[in-house]
Amino acid sequence: MAAKNWLTLFAFSCSAAANAVMFMDFVVLSELSANAFGVTPADIAATYSLGLFTTLPVAFLVVYFLPRRSYWVFFCGAFCNSLGAWLRWMALANGDWNLCLISTVSIGFGFAVCCMSFAVVGERWFPPEQQMLTTSIGVQSNYAGWCFGALLIPTLVKTAEDHERFMFVQAIATSFVVVFFFLFHNESVAKPQPEDIPSVGKSLGALCINKIYWVRLGSYATVGAVSYTIPAVQDALLAETLDATPDFTKWTDTAFIATGVITGLVLSAREPKNPRMLIKVLFVGCAVSLGVAAWLVSPLAEGLAMAPRRGALSVAMAIAGGTSLGFLGIALAQITHDAPDVHEAYSAGAVEWFVQAGGSFLSYNAINAQGFVICAALVIAATLSLLSAECLAGETAANEGGSGKDSTKPPKDSRGTHPSTFV
């Protein structure tokens, strides 16, 4: 039975990884893609935002049907990713900009399923002691696909013919996510869905009165939005400030995303003793590293030689990626404890929804020389907000006469697990 759980996670992770690769198809080759479609590089950058914007309304449908028809929700995610891959190839082969936009909408549909389901897969298919790790695997598989696209696409694609060939191979490979779904997705080994599913209004109402939940959500979503924004804007930002080409930005992208994937998996391999303190430390590290990055691309650092300046930037981006991407799986698993009576599709899904909303807005508006400054300022604000949430939580526990335990968690049953978590 355990093998079936992990195979379900494998099928989901493959779909999440394939989706992330497609988000990078054009933005890491902005000039080449712009020439292929007869548009501007800014239009190409907007495809990234369009995918995220599509995710936002679709997420409401996903979060409604996940507790009710989860098999078909996961199938739709895999199908939309495969469809998007084939539409992307046909769009590039024919230089059809409208078809390119349609393909972006399709992968936006697929991403809505992924981002609303990261915590759901961990919560429904795995016992409590494995939920943080499995949630992180889902999150980081998406980031790993992102890293793959950021590094290999600029490496393998040098001409229009290379680009079309890559897109064709990508379409064939992405078709396997549908095959993997039918082979490995298994609802029979998951925790059964409750017979009496609370209405959307009741679930959202329970969240709305939870002050600590919303403060933490705002902080997590802000840093998550920054983490989604940086790979989208690096190419244009570094070209403007450091005259960097894709041959350099692919390495800063890779440093940012790869360290995030590794950090997230390492930190969640064994559940941290104090995950909330760990998240705060990661937030501080992110704010500092992005501040350094902002300084390195500003006129204040023009006195430095270009080689050490670029080397220091790569290090700063690696730290920023490790901290801003590495925390999210841990945060999604933790925030379900802040609202234990609400389905994780709502409690964790709301975090991801605001991550995508913020990422959509930032990736469209931060493509300028001040992009890193904006991101650093937002992370600092999120860190201060998170510290205030912890103070509020401490005061609440003290007022309730708590003994330092997290009063938001439900009582444990005789097996030592939370009855609303795993069966």
Image (cartoon, grey):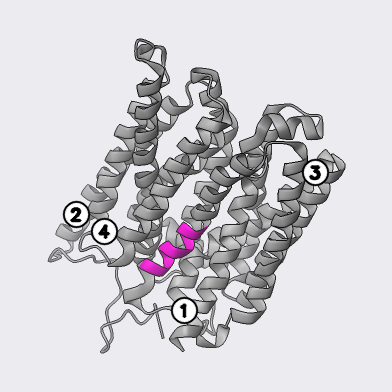
> Which residue type does callout 3 highlight?
Leu
Label pair 3/2, CB-CB below 8 angstroms: no
Label pair 3/4, CB-CB below 8 angstroms: no
In magenta, the rendered stretch is 133-141
Q: Quadrant of the C terminus?
A: bottom left
Query: What distance separates the C-alpha of mark 1 from that of mark 4?
Result: 22 Å
Task: Give coordinates of residue 149: x percent, y percent.
Answer: 58, 47
Q: What secondary structure is marked by label 2?
A: helix
Which residue corresponds to mark 2? 394
Q: Earlier in the sequence, mark 2 or mark 1?
A: 1
Secondary structure mostly seen in the magenta stretch: helix
x 29%, y 66%: residue: 408
Q: Name the foreground residue: 351 vs 195.
A: 351
Q: What secondary structure is marked by label 1?
A: helix
x 39%, y 77%: residue: 421
Q: Nearer the viewer, mark 2 or mark 4?
A: 4
Q: Name the foreground residue: 275 vs 184.
A: 184
Query: What distance separates the C-alpha of mark 3 from that of mark 2?
Result: 55 Å
Query: What distance separates the C-alpha of mark 2 from that of mark 4?
Result: 15 Å
Q: Earlier in the sequence, mark 2 or mark 4?
A: 4
Kindly indicate the quadrant of the structure image that contains residue 415: bottom left
Q: Earlier in the sequence, mark 1 or mark 4?
A: 1
Q: Earlier in the sequence, mark 3 or mark 2?
A: 3
Q: Nearer the viewer, mark 3 or mark 1?
A: 3
Q: Is residue 414 left or right of residue 239?
A: left
Q: Nearer the viewer, mark 3 or mark 2?
A: 3
Which residue corresponds to mark 4? 275
Q: Earlier in the sequence, mark 3 or mark 4?
A: 3
